[in-house]
Image (cartoon, rainbow, N blue to C red):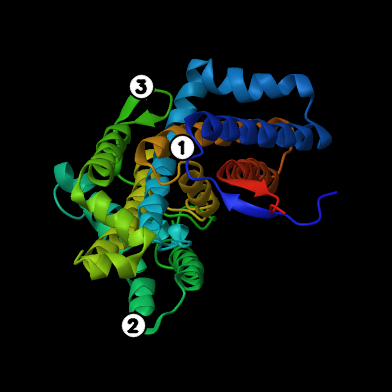
Amino acid sequence: MLDTAFLVRRQNPGFLLTSLSYVGGLLVGLTVSAVLLVHTGVPASALVDEFLIATFLTSDGLSQTATAALPLVLVGLASGVAMRVRFWNIGVEGQLWLGAIASTWVALNGSGPEVLRLPTMFVLAALAGAAWIAIPLFLKLKWGVNEVISTLLLGSVAFLLVQHLLFGVWRDPSNSFPVTATFPEASWFLVLGWGQLHAGIFLVAVIALSIWFVMEHSRVGFYADAVGFNAKAALATGLPVLSIAVGLVLLSGALSGVAGMMIVAGTEHRLNQSVGNGYLFSAIVIAYLARAKPLWVVVISFALGAVFTAGNVLKVFYSISEAMIVLMQGAVLMSILMAQFFSSYSLKRPKN
């Protein structure tokens, strides 16, 4: 009989154990998701068609998956870079909304020459996202306010600001719905001729590669890991703790803002109330599953884009709610996190 036991952290779980736990957790999460879908009325035979064939093995499905993955990569990177310095950015959606607002302002006012319209939208979106996250950053540094609370609350404030604009000065007079007028084509990303996939994919690729190089092959990444593991020890060794933390947190907000610009300039071509929906939870899922590693963020984002694509099909043909799609993401995340926990710790019985 096991009377007493305790958890001991494994010194080196090893690549095999880590990989098997990850795959095992993923399979358990997908199985739970499949059971939930069947229980809600989706035929079991349709699951393979919608989640594998329709999303990866058809041209239209693959283009939709790639298009959906673009903003997911940006919000995943945003959450990941902040996580590296132990700043929990739970307000990704708020920064995304501010980026979308800044981009919309440029598009609707026709600011600057047409050839510079998209670059202007990009810069202002990044600045708006960085400015929005600077508020909770200042509150934490000045008074120790928990960023989980402040970033989350500011996300709600940003959405209310969007509603104020959509029901007010930016409402399209020719439309009874709270949306802006369609952007001029100079404010659109060029469509590449493969479904809705647009030239924003090149911008995302450059950003992802740049973040990967900086975080994995430069001093900034090394300093960020040191700050994240033990900020006091890093400060004692003379590392620029404050500048690294502030810089990466502002970068997190800027990336989220660019994600907002990616959506309104890439697919929506206008601002509406659904632009930022669902990206908060998705950013957290991507960053945790990828362990804040930039290249894995891209992979996980593509997989989650497939879930979004399949989810849209399920919502149309099987009346599956948005809440069910979020529940599926949560089931996968919790399964993987539990599997990773047991790969990192072992159960030991004290010796007599």
Q: Residue at x 46, y 37 (%)?
A: 301
In the displayed structure, would residue 52 be above or below residue 128?
above
First reached walking from the N terminus: tag 3 or tag 1: 3
**Viewer-closest of 17 and 276:** 17
In front here: 38 or 190? 38
Front label number (1 vs 2): 2
Is 16 above or below relative to 96? above
Residue that numbered label 1 is attached to: 301
Q: Is residue 118 left or right of residue 32?
A: left
Q: Quadrant of residue 145?
A: bottom left
Tell me: residue 321, above or below residue 88. above
Pointer 3: what residue? 193
| Real-space Cα separation, disc 3 to disc 2, in angstroms | 50 Å
Task: Give the Cα separation between the discs numbered 3 and 1.
Answer: 22 Å
N-terminal of the two: label 1 or label 2?
2
In this figure, which residue is indicated by the disc labeled 2?
Answer: 142
- Density class for disc 2 (Cα within 10 Å; few <14, some 14-19, many ≥20) is few
Cα separation, mark 1 vs mark 2, equals 34 Å
Occupied quadrant, residue 30: top right
